[in-house]
Image (cartoon, helix red, strand yellow):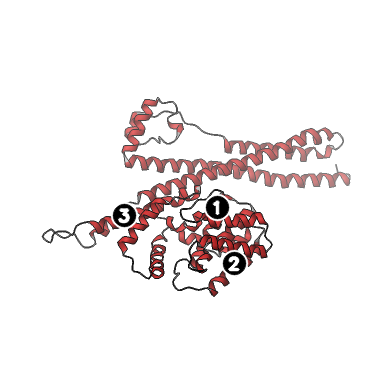
Amino acid sequence: MTNTKDDTTASSPHAEAGKNTGFAAELDKIQQHVRAFYRLHEDKHLVYHNIAHTEGVVSAAIRLAHHYQLNDEDFFAVIAACWFHDTGYYIGDGKDHEAKGAEMAGQFLKELQIPPSAIKTVQDCILATRIPQSPHTLPEKIVCDADLFHLGTDAFGECNKLMRKEAEMLQQNKISKEAWRLSTIRFLSDHHYHTDYGQSLLEPQKQYNIEMLQEKEAAHNEPAPDSNEQSPEPNGHNKKKEGKRPERGIETVFRISSGNHQKLSDMADRKAHIMISTNSIIISVLLSVLFRQLEQYPHFLIPAVMLLIICVLTIVFSILATTPRISNGRFSQQDLAAKKVNLLFFGNFYRMSLEDYTKGMNKLMDDREFLYGSLIRDVYSQGLVLARKYRLLRIAYDVFMYGLIASVIAFIIAAVAHTKGIL
């Protein structure tokens, strides 16, 4: 599975936050205040809910906030809430720590003269992390998912060990692995991510983590093998486990790849639309203003024609970049039997009957090799389309950039030559 732990902790949380918000100075003060708070209230029993966990939550929140392109105030509220969200553990016995953390955040933010609306958003975000989580707004959902971000990463195992150790130290009672495992399975099964980001990118790994715990629990409950039975080969279980493909991981890879390709395609379409709109405006100005004045300024004829040709070429290549290509919309039974048709793309079946398409899809769903082959073919086809789009778009940008420079130079030369009486 993809290791998301490294992605979220690769850079300083505050350094990243400062780049994207108008509250950089306030966030810096919050960071210093919370760090100082943790140093002054260090508790050896809290081996999980400490500054390291808080920094991880802040990093995850920054990642989510960037993804959703929050405005400055919401970005500030999310990051500030994450800094304060577990400070309540260090006040009293730690009960209802969300309310205590929200109160502490409110007091400090008032000292910073933060607007009351932003303070309320921060406090609501902290209170929303109370289990069971109940977020309503996007900032609250982001904070909740950031708080339990580790459930959907490879870091879950290590975090789970620390949480068990912390629970044992606080309760002053040994918790068996089996009891902790069962409670963790229940917790993970009841939990769900609230953002689309969490549901698409974190949920698959979380489900994988649940499956691993369930396998351990099943292995623990299996009766001991009879001594007369042939013992399995050494490392036999590990070999089987290593040979087993992580189905959810594969599905996640395809989902992410397809989603990224779609985003790149949308980006290319937007860029092409910008080029078409910009050059259309230039052409309209040329035709309505400059060409009408060529009798007065005949020396500008060549530069004007150059600029017109450049704009037309740019529009042509931009249109070509966004022009869709559709195949004949049919597939044969031979293609289906040979598993060469991609039934996931509408261009391959839109002229087929529903009955034929249903038969093809049933065959696809029953055949793992056919299914994954179709997914691979679909991702590859998207890549080819993207390559064509960006190649034509690059030509359009080059034509526009170098042509515009040449046209400006031509206008300057024409103006200077006319001034000196050459033209």
Q: Is residue 123 left or right of residue 25?
A: left
Amino acid type assigned to the residue bearing label 2 in the image: Gln
Helix, strand or loop under label 3: helix
Residue plotted at (34% across, 36% down)? 364
Q: Residue 23, relative to residue 137: is it above or below? A: below
Helix, strand or loop under label 1: helix
Residue plotted at (39% across, 40% down)? 374
Q: Residue 392, relative to residue 230: is it above or below? A: above
Query: Which disc, if any, is residue 214?
Result: 3
> Which is more toward the observer, 164 or 157?
164
Q: Are marks 1 and 3 in contact (CB under 8 Å)?
A: no
Quadrant including the N terminus: bottom left
Q: Which x, y percent locates residue 401?
A: 68, 46
Quadrant including the C terminus: top right
Q: Residues within 10 Å of mark 1 (few under 14, many from 20)?
A: many
Of label 1 and label 3, which has the lower sequence position? 1
Q: Are marks 2 and 1 in contact (CB under 8 Å)?
A: no
**Image-quadrant location for residue 366:** top left
Mark 1 highlights which residue?
140
